[in-house]
Each structure stands twice: as C-alpha cells, then as structure tokens.
Amino acid sequence: MSMPADRTIRLGFLLAGLVLAADLATKAAIVAWVEYGASHAWLPVLNIVHVLNRGAAFSFLHDAGGWQRFFFIVIALAASVFLVFMIRRPGTSRTERIGFGLILGGALANMIDRAARGAVVDWIDVHWGVHHWPAFNVADIGITLGAALIVLHELFGRKQAREANG
C-alpha cells in the first residue's frame, strides 16, 4: 500500500527537520558541556569528543586556509535546493523522498554550523583499540543513511518495481 504523494513529500521534509533539530541540539549540548579538544570514553568502542572540522568528510580540505568555509556553504545551499526539488518532484518514490529528506536535514545542519562557527562540530568518535574512524555527528549520520537508502533503492527497489509492472 502506498502513501499519497503529498504525504510522502511531508514525510521527506519532516525527516529533514528531525535530522536538523537533532543535530543542532546535540552539537549545542557538546559545545556547552564538553571542553574543546576533550575526549570522554563512553563505551569500549565509543568516545564523546569535541572537535571542529573546517573541511568536508574525513577532514577533506581542513587546512585549506579558510576559503573552503564559503565553498562548502555554497555547495550545501545548491545541494539543498536540488534536494527540495527532488522531494517535491512528481514520480519520486517514498523511499527516495525519505533518503533525500535525511540528506537535506544533514546538509542544512552542517551548513548552519559552518556558517555560525566557521567549522562543523563533530563529537562521535568510534574506535577499535587505537584505530579511530574520523569523528562525525548526527548530520553526517543522516547524510550517510539517506545516501545508502537511495543507493539501495536504485540497486534493488527499481528492479522490483519493474518486475512487478511486467
């Protein structure tokens, strides 16, 4: 059973708002309660940290000299306009709208952080012994889950839809 398009459009924007709100709230809590540069063990494979990333994923362009802040803000704005279009576009599936909404919320949250602070607050540090994954945040989780959902939909969902339609 499928939802009417207007309800799935609202769902995409609702998820974007939830990712945005959760990310901004958790970053505000980290900034308020965790000293910059600190690391607190929380689980055997998880630390809560307070770091700033002036670059993109995996600290790409972190040390570029400052111009990257505005570059990434422009990229986030352009991506957000595109994602809004994709969520509202007739023919976009429910799964795609969910994925686009998750990405939109993450993109807006990191853009707001970058505009307000000059960098993105990252606070989740997953590790195994001395091997650490680059620190990340709720916005990054939304972007990653949304992208994975869209890729999986492209690989499997469209094929199933074609097979069902004959």
Image (tube, grey):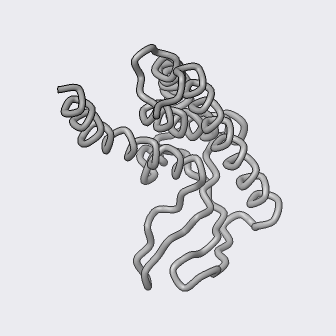
Q: As drawn, is 126 to the left or to the right of 148?
A: right
Question: Which x, y percent locates residue 96?
Answer: 42, 32
Looking at the rendered structure, the number of numbered marks drawn on it comes to 0
Is residue 83 placed above or below 62 in the rendered structure? above
Front residue of 150/68: it is: 150
Is residue 99 placed above or below 26 in the rendered structure? above
Residue drawn at 32 percent across, 39 percent down: 153
Q: As drawn, is 165 to the left or to the right of 147?
A: left
Residue drawn at 68 percent across, 72 percent down: 38
Q: As drawn, is 47 to the left or to the right of 33?
A: left
Question: Which x, y percent locates residue 53?
Answer: 56, 51
Quarter where residue 20 is shown: top right
Question: Which x, y percent locates residue 162?
Answer: 21, 29
- Location of the C terminus by quadrant is top left
Front residue of 140/99: it is: 99
Residue drawn at 76 percent across, 57 percent down: 31
Q: As drawn, is 156 to the left or to the right of 49?
A: left
Front residue of 160/73: it is: 160
